[in-house]
Image: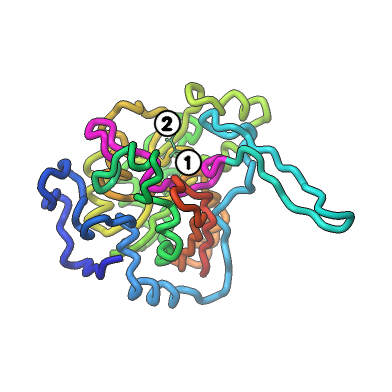
Amino acid sequence: MVNVDLAKLPKFDQLPVKEGAPPESVWGVFGDNDELGCLNFLTPENIVAAAKLVKTGKVFRLDAKVGYAKPPLFGRPPFVHDIVNLSPTAHDDLLNAYNTQEGSQWDGLAHVGHVKHRKFYDGVTAEEIRARKGRLMISSWANKFVGRGVMVDAAKYRADQGRPIKPLTRDVVTLDDLRGALAAQKTTLTPGSVLLVRTGWMEAYEASSDAEKKAMAPMDKLKSVGVEPSRALVEWLWNNRVAALGTDTPAAEPWPWNLTDADALHHRAIPLLGLSLGEQFVLKPLAEDCAKDGQWEFLLVAVPINLDNGIATPANTVCIK
Ligand code: UVW
């Protein structure tokens, strides 16, 4: 980790800073061989400040239950949980075929490379990742994912505006919606925040029947609300020094998105900005508590799976107020 002076970092329109790096990429901003991307914004000073947001001792777990999506979305395989009998009075768990992205998750920087530039964050190649060369491993984040969390309740904002989100359609939460919701919540996006955006997708999914869940699980059948995948959006995230973007949706951006679209949020955010996207979070209880006490900021603690050469991680995230 480099010492980051948030005030001195380039603005989005000054990117890139490294010769040969793609336009709108932050490669080199955090030095050579960086593994953290925007998590660099979670400085020790920011962690100390975030810890001071803890006032009541309330804890909110953002992970849905492991295996909540039946079947898992995007055609990911379901795991099988075996209880292994070690002796007449002892047991272990065995999660066969467990996919770290079967449910609530943070995308690591080895998850998605840029479809046009054919490179991952910082210029890392797919070959390096597949050869397990130790770049962009999820284990690099082991002690790094702690800081100020900020909730944006887009579902509440849009409903209050008389424009309720339709979570199970390709509805778009626009940058204007995010700005409007923050203003309505009287919340400021200070540098070094993990932004959580609630759309209501998780509740809509949970309210669906078993047959509806089965029908929407395959990649080509799923439809979901998500955050606007635009240049303006990533410019806003970068210039506000947002450390990660977590949502209650399957793909953070509206699904379906075209996997060959260079302008998809996955391509703009993960390889170019080094920004992790979080998906399938449980945000309603936290959002309701924020609406009640008017405090939309909190300490956020994520404990990524400590897996060398790992690609992504179950969310393992709590917010503490
Ligand atoms: C998709 O957009 C498919 O989401 P994920 O980050 O889970 O791959």
Query: At 35% from the left edge and 26% from the top edge, which residue is drawn?
Result: 258
What x and y, as percent, mark residue 259?
Answer: 35, 28
Sort mark 2 into few (<14), some (14-19) or many (20+) by Cα contacts within 10 Å. Answer: many
Label 2 C-beta lies within 8 Å of the nearest ligand 1 atom:
yes
Q: Position of residue 266 (x, y in %)?
A: 34, 39
Which stretch is magenta?
99-119
Q: State yes or no: residue 106 in magenta.
A: yes
Can residue 283 be seen? yes
Q: Quadrant of residue 213?
A: top right
Q: In this view, does 251 lie above or below 10?
A: above
Q: Look at the image and tell me whether residue 295 can be seen.
A: no
Quadrant of the image containing the N terminus:
bottom left
Ligand 1, seen in the image, is in the quarter at top left
Q: Label 2 belongs to which residue?
A: 255
Q: Quarter of the image holding residue 21?
A: top left
Q: What residue do we see at 50% from left, 32% from top? A: 168
Alpha carbons under labels 1 and 2: distance apart = 9 Å
The amino acid at mark 1 is Thr
Q: Who comes first in sequence, dot 1 or dot 2?
A: 1
Dot 1: what SS? Answer: loop
> Magenta span has 23?
no
Q: In this view, does 188 lie to the left or right of 213?
A: left
307 sits left or right of 263 in the view: right
- Residue under pointer 1: 249
Q: Nearer the viewer, residue 48 or 116?
A: 116
**Mark 2 residue type:** Trp
Q: Nearer the viewer, residue 90 or 172?
A: 90
Secondary structure category for the residue under label 2: loop
**Can you give x and y, in whole percent of width and height, for residue 26 in the image?**
21, 51
Q: Is label 1 in contact with label 2 (beta carbons under 8 Å)?
A: yes
Q: Which residue in the rendered view is the most extreme toward the right?
A: 88
